Image (cartoon, grey):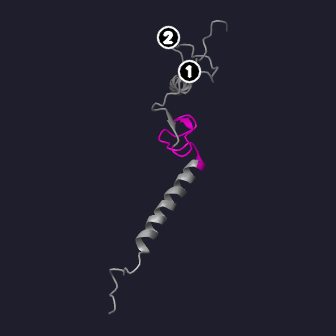
Amino acid sequence: MAGQVRCEYILCSQPLPAGARSDKQYCCPAHKAAARRWRRHNLEAVGIGIAFIRGVDDEHVVRCPVCGKRFALGHGHRRDSTYCGHACRQAAYRARLRAGQQVHVAVTKEPNVTDPGTTASR
């Protein structure tokens, strides 16, 4: 058992099949794909960490338009996120709603204006 090679996937400790090629690293295609995703995630996380340290906003590190907090896309957030959290998203929605109501009120509450569908009596 001393010469037995094990799968290189971090969460697997299965030995490789006995007749496997000498350059085989993973016990199955699923572990090979998972290891590739793990490496890509770690490389991206290091890049985001460096961007945070330097204070640079790039495609992975953006600012929330409501509170100004910087956050990383793809790590705890969707890649197409605009806001840093639920509270900021809700605050932006309420601000848009208030702005829309003010415009609606200003348009519909003008004095001496009749609706186009009604006839003015003389």
Mark 1 lies on residue:
27
Residue farthest front in this picture: 111
Residue 56's place in the image compared with 5, above or below, is: below
Looking at this view, is 59 or 91 the one in front?
91
Query: Which disc number belongs to residue 58?
Result: none
Report the side of 60 relative to 116 (left or right).
Answer: right
Task: Classify 10 Å Cα crowding around label 2: few (below 14), some (14-19), many (20 and above).
Answer: few
Q: CA distance from mark 1 to mark 2?
A: 12 Å
Residue type pointed to by label 2: Asp
Q: Residue at x 53, y 42 (%)?
A: 64
Predominant SS of the magenta segment: loop
Specify whether 60 is left or right of 69.
Answer: left
Question: Residue 62: x and y, percent?
Answer: 50, 36
| Total tally of numbered discs in the picture | 2
Residue range in magenta is 65-87
Q: Which residue is mark 2?
A: 23
